[in-house]
Image (cartoon, rainbow, N blue to C red):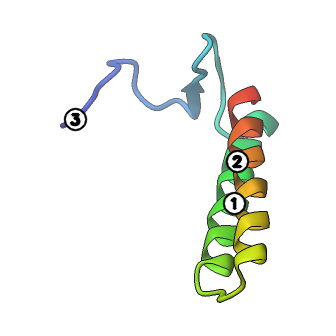
């Protein structure tokens, strides 16, 4: 499924709450960094045989999801 905004790509992106910012805006960069950190953490804890480490990792991931929602 393709979604078109019909505004073209002028180096800007829409924010969920409204408005537009440049794609290199610190807020957009923060989205990506938090998402990448969450992904890397998941990859790091997934193979661990230690339940306490996995539990801690999942708690941190939940907080990162919360952080992403605030952004």
Relative side of 42 to 59, left or right: left
Q: Secondary structure at mark 2?
A: helix
Q: CA distance from mark 3 to mark 2?
A: 30 Å
| Residue holding disc 1 | 58
Judged left or right of residue 64, residue 46 is left
Gap between marks 1 and 3, in whole Å? Answer: 33 Å
- Identity of the residue drawn at 78% across and 56% down: 60
Above or below for 2 versus 61: above
Residue 1 vs 8, above or below: the answer is below
Task: Determine whether label 1 and label 2 are within 8 Å by CB.
Answer: yes
Q: Is the Cβ of the residue at disc 3 closer than 8 Å to that at disc 2?
A: no
| Residue 57 found in image quarter | bottom right
x and y percentages locating residue 11 in the rendered image: 57, 34
Q: Residues within 10 Å of mark 3 (few under 14, many from 20)?
A: few
Q: Which residue is mark 2?
A: 62
Q: Earlier in the sequence, mark 1 or mark 3?
A: 3
The residue at which mark 3 appears reads as 2
Q: Which mark is residue 32?
A: none
Which quadrant, please, contains the N terminus?
Answer: top left
Question: Which label sits in the foreground, 3 or 2?
Answer: 2
Residue at (68, 80) in percent of width and height: 44
Q: Secondary structure at mark 3?
A: loop
Question: Label 1 to label 2, Cα distance in Å?
Answer: 6 Å
Q: Are marks 1 and 3 in contact (CB under 8 Å)?
A: no
The residue sitting at the front extreme is: 51
Camera-side residue: 10 or 50?
Answer: 50
Across and down, in percent, residue 33 comes to 73, 54
Using the rendered view, name the quadrant where residue 41 is placed. bottom right
Residue 29 in the image: x percent, y percent? Answer: 73, 45
């Amino acid at each position: 499924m393709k979604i078109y905004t019909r505004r073209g790509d002028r180096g800007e992106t829409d924010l969920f709450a409204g408005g537009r910012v440049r794609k290199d805006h610190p807020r957009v960069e923060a989205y990506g960094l938090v998402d990448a950190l969450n992904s890397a953490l998941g990859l790091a804890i997934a193979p661990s045989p230690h339940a306490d480490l996995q539990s801690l990792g999942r708690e941190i991931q939940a907080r990162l999801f919360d952080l992403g929602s605030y952004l």
